[in-house]
Image (cartoon, coloured by chain):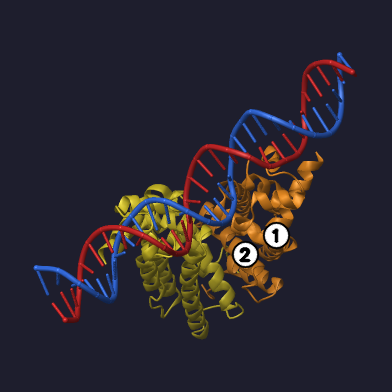
Chain colours: A yellow, B orange, C blue, D red
Amino acid sequence: MQTRLNLLHAGKVIFLKEGFQKATMTEINKQANTGYGTAYVYFKNKDELFGELMENIVEKMYEVASLPFEPKTSEEAFEQIKTQVRLFIQAALDEQEMMKVLKEAIGVSEIVEGKWSQIRTRFIAGIIKDITFVQEAGMANKEIEASLIARGWYYMNEQVMWDILLGEVAEDLNRVAENLALLYTRGLYVGK
Amino acid sequence: MQTRLNLLHAGKVIFLKEGFQKATMTEINKQANTGYGTAYVYFKNKDELFGELMENIVEKMYEVASLPFEPKTSEEAFEQIKTQVRLFIQAALDEQEMMKVLKEAIGVSEIVEGKWSQIRTRFIAGIIKDITFVQEAGMANKEIEASLIARGWYYMNEQVMWDILLGEVAEDLNRVAENLALLYTRGLYVGK
DNA sequence: GTATTTAATTGATATTATGTCAATGATATA
DNA sequence: TATATCATTGACATAATATCAATTAAATAC
């Protein structure tokens, strides 16, 4: 349906210009050259319209979350983890402006929060699998509770990603990935 | 001023009952037995009223953020870090219900987001100091960039704290603190 | 080619919340 | 007791939402 696509496109324009909270259905309809009621025919509300707009981001994130991880040595693990951190942050940077709007929307809209939360869940599930793998291979500390550490490790990555996105972290992507992966694999302290 | 205190108290009641977004000035005034306009005399808007209500939480968090950290050995560091994780999460749990509302408000209100962001900044600054201290004492890996790792470590703690608050993490506080501190100090992988 | 059904579009309407402000009421000071 | 100051109020203008009966357009039948 052309009108629907017009509205989605108009929505993107308005969301990028105004941010999530300030964007209004009135403006989106105006931008799409449709009458006020029209947007409500195709979308329950603003949240749902944005929900559709974030779908391709969701897909890309799912892809990153399901990357394979089967290192044979700790060194290999370190390298692979570094790569995954880079890919995760890079995926966000590829959609930087929409991601900024998305961050705002997560805080405001139940629907958007729900979708993002599913991304989180997938990542964390993936990391739990990875940790269990290296623990069983004898590479990793078995005292560690995979579900907890997976959560912590994911959050560390996500939040640093938001900071980079918002320009609050100066360091370049490689250095960030290197540091995070280093802490994760080797810990902060030297000499056991 | 009594009216002001009444409004603050009423605000707390309504925020706890309705959450941040659903709470309205109309309801708060009703709860305080004041006319509609009165709340606007004492507070610029809902955000500012909530901002005042979160002040004691802010204070408590600042206290936790400025706890001393001068370990003499890695073992001592581990213990102190574990304690600090526990204190941080416990401080949040002490105000569990208000913290839930706060989490919602962070996403919605610039004012609240700003205040919470200052808490973050203080914690991260404190952690940078702590990392630099142990690096200079030769206890910690000097390749690591303190500012990056401080950020990551803080975020890991903050997000896990929110999860515990919302009942999304089953493990008990000690186990959580133990695991996070373990990852932070020793890393996930064994045998260098 | 016209009539009829079905689908798409519309904007007026009811609703709900916000923030402002002139007017009123209460209290302290001269 | 008069007057000045301060506190309180609720009606109002504004802005956004979601709904829906009415209109317009398109597709199908005859």
Q: Could you tell me which secondary element the residue under label 2 belongs to?
A: helix
Amino acid residing under circle 1:
Leu
Q: Going 56% across and 78% down the picture, which residue do you hit? A: A146
Same subunit, labels 1 and 2: the answer reads: yes
In the image, residue B85 sits, relative to residue B50, either above or below, namely below
Q: Going 55% across and 71% down the picture, which residue do you hit? A: A151
In the image, residue A167 sits, relative to residue A176, either above or below, namely above
The residue that mark 1 highlights is B16
Coordinates of residue A18 in the picture (x, y in percent): 41, 48
Q: Is residue A21 left or right of residue B55?
A: left
Quarter of the image with the N terminus of chain A in it: bottom left
Coordinates of residue B61 in the picture (x, y in percent): 69, 53
The residue that mark 2 highlights is B162
Amino acid residing under circle 2:
Trp
Q: Nearer the viewer, residue B86 or A36?
A: A36
**Residue B2 in which image quadrant:** top right
Q: In this rendering, does residue A125 appear at all?
A: yes
Q: Nearer the viewer, residue B97 or B175?
A: B97
Q: Chain of mark 1?
A: B
Badge 1: how crowded within 10 Å, few (<14), some, or many (20+)?
some
Q: Chain of mark 2?
A: B
Badge 2: how crowded within 10 Å, few (<14), some, or many (20+)?
some
Quarter of the image with the C terminus of chain A in it: bottom right
Q: Could you tell me which secondary element the residue under label 1 belongs to?
A: helix
Q: Nearer the viewer, residue B121 or A187?
A: B121
Q: In this rendering, does residue B88 appear at all?
A: no
